[in-house]
Amino acid sequence: MFPTYRIQPLLYAALIWLVGVVGASAQWLVYELRFTPEEDSVNFSFYTGGYVVVPAGGGAASIVLTTEEGGRYYAVAESSGKYFVAANANVRKAVFAAASLTGSSQAFYTASGLMNRSLLLGGSEGPRSWRVAENLSGRLMAADDESSSGPAPDGSLGVIGGAIITGTLREDLTANASASFTSQNTVTAYIIELLEKYGYAPDEGSLPAPEISVDDALMIDASLFPVETRGQAPAND
């Protein structure tokens, strides 16, 4: 499940690699997300960005959330999300959707984008062209009556909040992931190692990085990482 807001520990999350999710296709899309909180939110603190890893043909979505508030941190959320296509005779949209219902908290994520271009990806089974969305947009909505925890030391109680979601297809990460990795676990590990290269550390309460095979680990080498520019991590580009 995806977290409702940042201050909630992620220990309840059962990560996708614990159930051995492997996409039917070894071609992946990686979207970089940004979250812009809405001004009328109350007691709402969420991650500022993240990376979504999905099979190019649709399926379970894995996400690595990031923040630069108080330092650079990341957290991996469980794959209760989905990536799919919504279409009719007039339009085709790529959709990312997820829901988190944990204890007294709940959150809902939806983001979509027009499938407006073709993208040729390499992979173990040879190159293939996919119709993809270059950009995603949507909303996160979250609420928690905090009935199980009671008021904070400052007297605040309850959470209501929302954020605008914007997403951009990272063609560099997408190409590297599709050409080099055959499992969603390894793509997620690749994103985590990239973030750690730029100074990100696991957030408090987050679960550890995925366990992958020695052969997969050897595939994650320095040549796969984009060159650092402007002294910033990719999550800020």
Image (cartoon, rainbow, N blue to C red):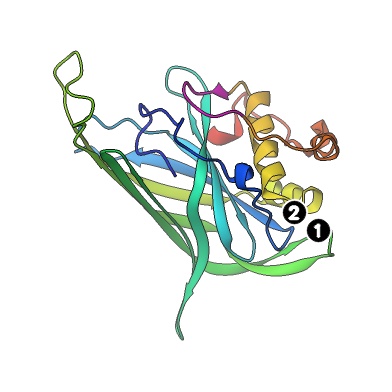
Give the overall secondary structure of the magenta segment: loop
Q: Earlier in the sequence, mark 2 or mark 1?
A: 1
Residue type of the residue flagged with mark 2: Ser
Q: Is residue 165 above or below residue 24?
A: above
- Where is residue 2? Give x, y as percent: 43, 43
Give the residue furthest to the top.
153
Q: Is residue 196 left or right of residue 140?
A: right
Indicate yes or no whether the magenta region holds residue 157.
no
What is the C-alpha distance between the residues marked 2 and 1?
5 Å
Q: SS class of the residue under badge 1? A: loop
Q: In the image, is residue 18 above or below residue 192?
A: below
Counting from the top left corner in percent of width and height, residue 228 is at 69, 29
The residue labelled by disc 2 is 178
Q: Quadrant of the C terminus?
A: top right
Q: Give the residue displayed 51% in from the left and 43% down from the top.
A: 78
Q: Residue at x 19, y 13 (%)?
A: 153
Q: Give how far across and how far down residue 56 sits, in percent.
A: 64, 62
Is residue 205 depicted above or below 103 in this figure? Answer: above
Tags 2 and 1 touching, CB below 8 Å: yes
Start and end of the magenta stretch? 201-208
For disc 1, the marked residue is 123
Residue 92 in view in this figure: no
